[in-house]
């Protein structure tokens, strides 16, 4: 019955992946989304919230809430006027989160390795590629 149902199968996969990622990042008291936002900022300091939205494929209001929460934890700071526009903010890691970002990157690599063991590198690469391609075509 469900072998052709994209909705059911994508959601079943998402629940499994969410469980694995939530467990992995819980040791840092972070959700996977917060961890990925920190990893993104670590790799590209000074990103604007708008750029973060594009990269993480999340709404601006969601990114604003994430940044507020991470700022309260002392993990990010906002700096205005980063691009010459006083209204635009760049997002940066704090000293507190710089070391944490290395641990988050390591955890991400561990998760990647775990999936390669489970699925094989070619199947994992193909699956992620197809999901990304499909997401852009459905929208």
Image (cartoon, rainbow, N blue to C red):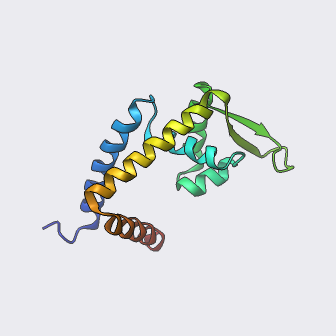
In the picture, residue 41 is in which quadrant?
Answer: top right
- Residue found 55% across the figure and 51% down from its top: 59
As rendered, which of 92 and 123 lies closer to the eye?
Answer: 123
* Image quarter in which the N terminus is found: bottom left
- Residue found 17% across the figure and 66% down from its top: 2
Instruction: State left or right for residue 84 relative to residue 113.
Output: right
Q: x, y (%) of residue 12?
A: 25, 54
- Residue found 33% across the figure and 58% down from its top: 116
- Residue found 23% across the figure and 68% down from its top: 5
In the picture, residue 77 is in which quadrant?
Answer: top right
As rendered, which of 64 and 84 lies closer to the eye?
Answer: 84
In the picture, residue 127 is in which quadrant?
Answer: bottom left
Q: Is residue 76 above or below residue 87?
A: above
As rendered, which of 100 and 51 lies closer to the eye?
Answer: 100
Q: x, y (%) of residue 92?
A: 69, 39
Q: x, y (%) of residue 16?
A: 27, 49
Q: x, y (%) of residue 32?
A: 44, 41
Instruction: State left or right for residue 10 relative to residue 38.
Output: left
């Amino acid at each position: 019955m469900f072998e052709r149902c994209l909705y059911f199968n994508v959601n079943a996969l998402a629940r499994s992946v969410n469980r694995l990622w939530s467990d992995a990042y819980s040791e840092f008291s972070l959700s996977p989304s917060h961890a990925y936002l920190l990893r993104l900022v670590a790799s590209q300091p000074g990103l604007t919230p708008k750029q973060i939205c594009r990269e993480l494929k999340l709404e601006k209001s969601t990114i604003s809430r994430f940044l507020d929460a991470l700022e309260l934890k002392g993990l990010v700071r906002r700096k205005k006027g980063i691009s010459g526009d006083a209204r635009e903010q760049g997002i940066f890691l704090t000293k507190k989160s710089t070391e944490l970002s290395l641990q988050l990157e390591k955890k991400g690599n561990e998760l990647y390795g775990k999936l390669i063991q489970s699925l094989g590198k070619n199947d994992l690469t193909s699956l992620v590629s197809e999901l990304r391609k499909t997401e852009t075509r459905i929208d």
